[in-house]
Image: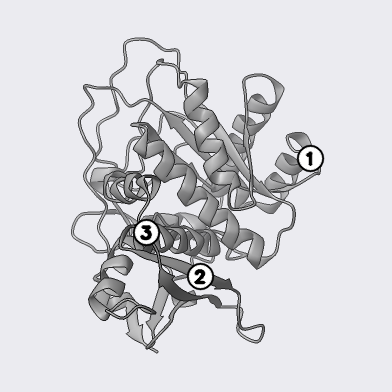
Amino acid sequence: MSNTHPDRDTVHAALALAVRAPSVHNSQPWSWRVGDSTVHLYADTGRHLPHTDPDQRDLVLSCGAALHHLRIAARVLGWEAVVHRLPSPADPDHLAAIEFRAGTPTPDAVRLARAISRRRTDRRRYTSWEVPSAYLATIVVAGADSGVLVHEVEDGFARTQLLRAFEQAAWEHARDFSYGVELAQWSGRHASEEGVPARNAVKTVDATVRPFSNPGLPQAVVRDTDCAERMLLLSTSADDRMSRLRAGEAASAVLLTATSLGLATCPLTEPFEVQGIRNRIRTDILDDSAFPQLAIRIGWAATGSGPLLATPRRPVGDVVHPL
């Protein structure tokens, strides 16, 4: 290892954590290219889901989450990632060029790096235990550090409108045959390195849970019908590729921070995949002041519901290539 660039084993260790990031339908739409002194992140458009994600917004969000995971992994390994986002104007799929400089692991980086291996997308019901306001404030600040607005959608008109948006999107998708075929192709799997496994899909109980194929995860048993989960809406001032990449980084920060605090999380994108519904969210909830990118549900998992198994990932060697 030199003083200016981590060695090959360190880079691959960091990338092994980066690819634990969540992605739309666990499609893992990223490609990493490693040079002598840089690492480059590319969108793998061959893994684009056209009927779920017509404008590639989910794809870029997914890559942004992986980029943030890499930054955390590098920091805990003693390196600071210097990120140049969208460095090639002629190649919009070249999302980031990353250089490194020596750094010192911080306690926050250690906590977030540990959360990478513990984080799961928990689609089950959450309990009625309140999420402390101090926890929520910490989570919001973590997401806002990426220049993204993280806004809690509280009970009342805004929450009603958001839940209605989920219902409308589910209805639109239920009528879309091509979307249904694509969803079936990417879910309900048992022995695969990609897609949403049956063991991580739960039977739909409300519109915020996407109806993946062959759900095999038992629904959490809770003793009351009240739920104290928090719903966070992540939005950006613009709606270009840079903004979406940043929103993905912010989503990673929110998810890892919540996980480090012991909370369950579930990123949600379905109502933002239908343009007309997304426009209504922007108008009804954000007063046309920002562009909504995704929501994240946060709460306490039921103690008796059992741990979730990790979703599979493609081998690092399949997504990391020499420059």
Q: Which of marks 1 and 3 is nearer the N terminus?
A: 3
Determine the secondary structure under disc 1.
helix
Determine the secondary structure under disc 2.
strand
In the rendered view of the protein, which quadrant contains the C terminus?
Answer: bottom left
Q: At 50% across and 70% down in the image, what residue appears?
A: 82
Q: How far apart are marks 1 and 3 (CA)?
A: 44 Å
Q: Which of marks 1 and 2 is in front?
A: 2
Q: Which of 267 and 89 is in front in this view?
A: 89
Q: At 44% across and 17% down in the image, what residue appears?
A: 130
User: Pointer 1: what residue?
Assistant: 283
The residue at the far top in this view is: 224
Task: Give the image location of residue 289, x and y in percent.
Answer: 80, 44
Mark 2: amino acid: Val
Above-or-below relation of 286 to 3: above
The quadrant where residue 153 appears: top right
Q: Which of 144 and 193 is in front in this view?
A: 144
Q: Nearer the viewer, mark 2 or mark 3?
A: 3
User: Tags 1 and 2 in contact by the CB under 8 Å rule?
Assistant: no
User: Tags 1 and 3 in contact by the CB under 8 Å rule?
Assistant: no
Mark 1: amino acid: Thr
Above-or-below relation of 221 to 36: above
Q: Earlier in the sequence, mark 1 or mark 2?
A: 2
Task: Give the image location of residue 112, x and y in percent.
Answer: 36, 47
Determine the secondary structure under disc 3.
loop
Q: Is residue 51 left or right of residue 320?
A: right
Q: Which of the labelled discs sits on residue 82, or is there none?
A: 2
User: Pointer 3: what residue?
Assistant: 104
